[in-house]
Every structure is written in structure tokens, then in C-alpha cells.
Amino acid sequence: METILMIALIMAVTELLITKIVEVMGCKASSYLVFAIVDIVAGLLILVFALWDLRNSVGEFAGIFGQLALMIGEPIAAVFLIGDLIVWKVSKKAALSEE
């Protein structure tokens, strides 16, 4: 359980850091959009690594890192993406109710 929480924390901090860097660089896109794009790219990178590891590994534990990446990394990325969508919808609804 601690491993999953640590991976989730590392992914969240990395994605928030990249989102903040993009904001500082002067990008006019929404923070929610930037976070979603970074999360999608992270999910695709995890998928590419997992497929590469499953395809190219040899030996007794062939493909174990790819399987772990698919079982742990992809669900975390999906939860972050769904969470970003929910927070975006709620903030959009709150902004419309203020007007």
C-alpha cells in the first residue's frame, strides 16, 4: 500500500510541477487542461514502457516491471485524470453560479 501511495505522490508532484512551469512560462491555457495533458502523456509513457518491457524482457522474471507498471501506474494516471475532470467541472459550475 505504501508503494502505491508513494508512486501516486511522485506522479502528482511531478504533474503539478510541470503544470506550474508551464504557467510560469506564460502559457494562457487553463491549469486543468495542462494537468490533463501532462497526465495523458505520463499515462502513455507508462504504457509504452510496459509494452516495451513485456516484449523485450528475457529471463525468469521477464516482463514483471511492465506488468507492475500496467497494474499500478495506469490506474493512478486514470484516477488523476478523472479527478482533474471532476475538479474542472465543479470549478466551472461554481464560476457560472457566481455570475
Image (tube, rainbow, N blue to C red):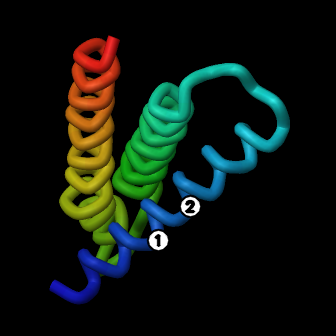
Residue shown at the point (34%, 21%) measured from the top left: 95
Q: CA distance from mark 2 to mark 1?
A: 6 Å
- Badge 1 crowding class, 10 Å Cα cut-off, few under 14, some 14 to 19, many 20 or more, is few
Q: Position of residue 49 (x, y in %)?
A: 47, 51
Type of amino acid at the residue the image marks with label 1 = Ile
Which residue is pictured at 49% across the width and 38% down the height? 35
Q: Are marks 2 and 1 in contact (CB under 8 Å)?
A: yes
Judging by the rendered image, the residue that carries numbered circle 2 is: 14
Quadrant of residue 59 in the image? Answer: bottom left
How many marks do you count on the picture?
Answer: 2
Pinpoint residue 79: horizontal percent, then vertical percent.
21, 47
Q: Nearer the viewer, residue 34 or 68?
A: 34
Q: For the residue labelled by badge 1, is the local secondary structure a helix, a strand or a loop?
A: helix
Amino acid beneath label 2: Thr
Specify the quadrant that holds the N terminus: bottom left
6 vs 77: above or below: below
Residue that mark 1 sits on: 10
Q: Is residue 6 above or below residue 95?
A: below
- Which residue is located at x 30 percent, y 19 percent? 98
Tag of residue 48: none
